[in-house]
Amino acid sequence: MRPYFLLAAIVCVACAVEPGDDSVTYGEQFVLSVGASEIVGPEDVEIGFHSLLHELRCPLDVDCIWAGRARIQVWFHVPGQDTVYLEPLIEAYVFSADEGAHKRVYTRRHSIALRQLDPYPIWFVEASDSADLAASLTFSLNPVPMESDRLIFVDGSSFDAFRANVIDAFEVDSVSVSGDTLVVRVRYSGGCKEHDFFVVGSQDWVPLAPPLMDVVVIHDGHLDACEAYLWRYLLIGLTSIREQRGSGVVLIAVQSAPDTVLYSF
């Protein structure tokens, strides 16, 4: 249910690590203001809050057709590597205590989630200057490295976390199997930025005959505001299944796909 009282809705983040504390570990929540940075994890990854990209969350006590979302730009730098810019988002009425509701943005090795963005907009209060913003973030290693051309095979609890974080909308037109390759045809809007797709499968197969494996496609459009209607084929290698299971057959059920497909390995 949508919250109507700001003090009751916004979860205190006093327990989060404040900027400048060098004790932040992977997965631990910390708070950044615009222009500030923090050191995270044993790799000494520096993470900074660059800017607010948009604030479109429906204000409290306002009935909106769309609840909206906010998105920020952050950067992170692993010593000896190039700086990477990411654009985590948060849906309206999502706060730090809402476990499972936070959408992660992924690189091959790391992921970041915007767990809370304060202050939350209120219809009768003038919008805050971006300098007053406070972003509560978590930065983690991925359970397995993310690859755009290979099925990422994870345990059931990790799969549920991925399934809750598909990030940006898209449609699955069709799925098929050709040899050791899963072919997924997707449609999405965009045209001005490169879009990333990752395909994740659950190790916890449904015990049918043959068994059923749930699969989810994660799409990050990187805030592509263009509205061309595009399609592409995702060609996803399935050899990770053989590496995990040896040999056999499995039905593959891609979330939102019209059909399941059979893969022999």
Image (cartoon, rainbow, N blue to C red):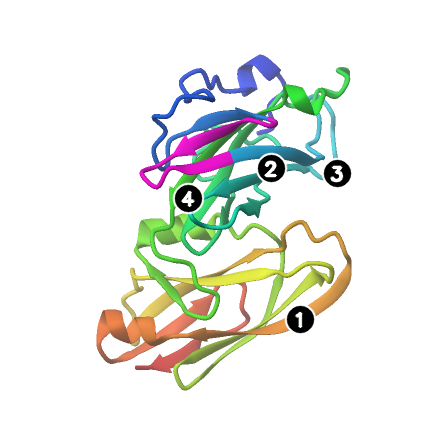
Q: Mark 4 points at which residue?
A: 79
Q: In this view, does 215 lie to the left or right of 209?
A: right
Residue type (three-letter) at the residue carrying disc 4 = Pro
In terms of sequence position, does the residue under pointer 3 or pointer 1 come before the other?
A: 3
The residue at 26%/72% (across/down) is 243
Mark 3 surroundings: few (<14), some (14-19) or many (≥20) residues within 10 A: few
Mark 2 surroundings: few (<14), some (14-19) or many (≥20) residues within 10 A: many
Q: How far apart are marks 4 and 1 (CA)?
A: 37 Å
Q: Name the residue under label 2.
A: 91
Q: Of tags 3 and 1, which is closer to the observer?
A: 1
Instruction: Pinpoint residue 249: horizontal percent, then vertical percent.
Output: 30, 79
Q: What stretch of residues is rendered in magenta?
A: 34-47
Residue type (three-letter) at the residue carrying disc 1 = Trp
| Label 3: element kind | loop
Judge by depth and name the residue closer to the eye, 201 or 252. Answer: 201
Q: Mark 3 points at which residue?
A: 65
Q: Of tags 4 and 1, which is closer to the observer?
A: 4
Q: Mark 1 points at which residue?
A: 231
Residue type (three-letter) at the residue carrying disc 3 = Ile
| Label 4: element kind | loop
Q: Distance between the residues labelled 3 and 1?
A: 28 Å
User: Quadrant of the image for the N terminus?
Assistant: top right
In terms of sequence position, does the residue under pointer 4 or pointer 1 come before the other?
A: 4
Q: Of tags 3 and 2, which is closer to the observer?
A: 2
In terms of sequence position, does the residue under pointer 4 or pointer 3 come before the other?
A: 3
In terms of sequence position, does the residue under pointer 2 or pointer 4 come before the other?
A: 4
Q: Determine contact: label 3, label 2, CB under 8 Å.
A: no
186 vs 1: above or below: below
Most extreme residue toward the left is: 246
The residue at 56%/50% (across/down) is 167
In terms of sequence position, does the residue under pointer 3 or pointer 2 come before the other?
A: 3
Q: In this view, does 105 lie to the left or right of 181?
A: right
